[in-house]
Amino acid sequence: MKARLLGAIAGGLILASAVPAQAERDTARFTSLTVFGDSLVDAGNIFTATGGAIPAASQGYFNGRFTNGYDYTDLLSIELFGAPTVASLQGGTNFAFGGARASNTNPQVPDFGEQLGLYAGYLAAGNQVDSNGLYILNFGGNDVFNAPDDPAAADMFIRQSAQDYAAGVQALNDLGVRNVLLTGFPVAGPLGFSAEQYLTEELAGLSLTGDTSLFRYSYFDFFDRILTDPGALGLPSQRLDITCQAAGPAAIANDCDGIFSFDGIHFSAPIHEALARDIDSQFNVLGSVPEPTTWAMMIFGFFMAGSAIRRRKRVQLSYS
């Protein structure tokens, strides 16, 4: 499968160089969105590489995503730029592949290091790093799922995953990337918790440029709040005992509302919507900055207000 993927990737990179960049919004905090990751944020790379066979629309999957709607990176992109992310094999800047790992250990699909290689090819085709863009990294689940059964070997495996994950952050920084949103390992349990600890240690040892912003998002915290107070995330109580697919067509038609998992591995669309809202609330991803003319008007307004106050104080003093 990997050989077929490489052929499709080569075609995708050629297409990417021919597609104009998305129009920027003057007041957006970020001017572009680039994604690296696994099936939680794959916008259609596996779908494209398999000729539409995986994930199958007949099973309720939406537009090549591994869920029943847009994923959280799509939703952030829609709010920022008016359109969802586009898979790199379709000419976009979403380099995520279902099944990918932070460690370069999956022989079937491009893992994080290989996705960075695809991005390097994208840059070599004449594109540029957007220092004002947001780069989202979403890895870790497949590393935990595929760790060896032996505890010592498993610990070594996830430690390497954490090292490779952090090394990818450093590589992006060195390329000129200045805004990185990094999600943690999304699989609870002893191995997942250990992986998070290792990742914390590895990130602390990076040599990032002074103006690089690293936004780290915790899936574990998100899951805990879903269980304890879903209403605060804009969600009803979630069913964890059944998947949306198993619940049947009626549940899918109802947007899988109140069901946490779409297929037993991937989040349902409402969970992605809650993710997008929560990430924005924590890091102000959708926050805007005033246009230059607006800044000028604001500064002028502050100046005039200050002048008025000073004049008022002088008048008051003259009568004292």
Image (cartoon, rainbow, N blue to C red):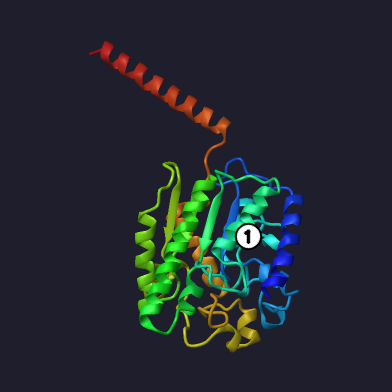
The residue drawn where x is 70% and y is 63% is 9
Quarter of the figure with residue 263: bottom right
Q: Nearer the viewer, residue 60 or 10?
A: 10
Crowding at dot 1, Cα within 10 Å, few <14 / some 14-19 / many 20+, comes out as many
Q: Position of residue 316 (x, y in %)?
A: 29, 16
Relative height, residue 111 to residue 145 (above, below): above
Count of numbered badges drawn on the protein: 1
User: Which residue type does callout 1 highlight?
Assistant: Asn
Label 1: state its secondary structure.
Answer: loop
Q: Quadrant of the N terminus?
A: bottom right
Which residue is under mark 1?
94
Relative height, residue 222 to residue 292 (above, below): below
Q: Nearer the viewer, residue 118 or 259?
A: 118
Q: Quadrant of the C terminus?
A: top left
The reply, left or right, for residue 83 in relation to residue 292 is: right
The residue drawn where x is 42% and y is 25% is 305
Residue 92, can we see it? yes
Relative height, residue 259 to residue 296 (above, below): below
Residue 78, can we see it? no
Quarter of the figure with residue 252: bottom right
Q: Position of residue 5 (x, y in %)?
A: 70, 69
Farthest residue in the top direction?
Answer: 318
Q: Nearer the viewer, residue 175 or 36?
A: 175
Quarter of the figure with residue 225: bottom left
Q: Position of residue 235 (x, y in %)?
A: 48, 72
The reply, left or right, for residue 50 in relation to residue 250 is: right
Q: Position of residue 25 (x, y in %)?
A: 63, 44
The reply, left or right, for residue 307 in relation to residue 75 is: left
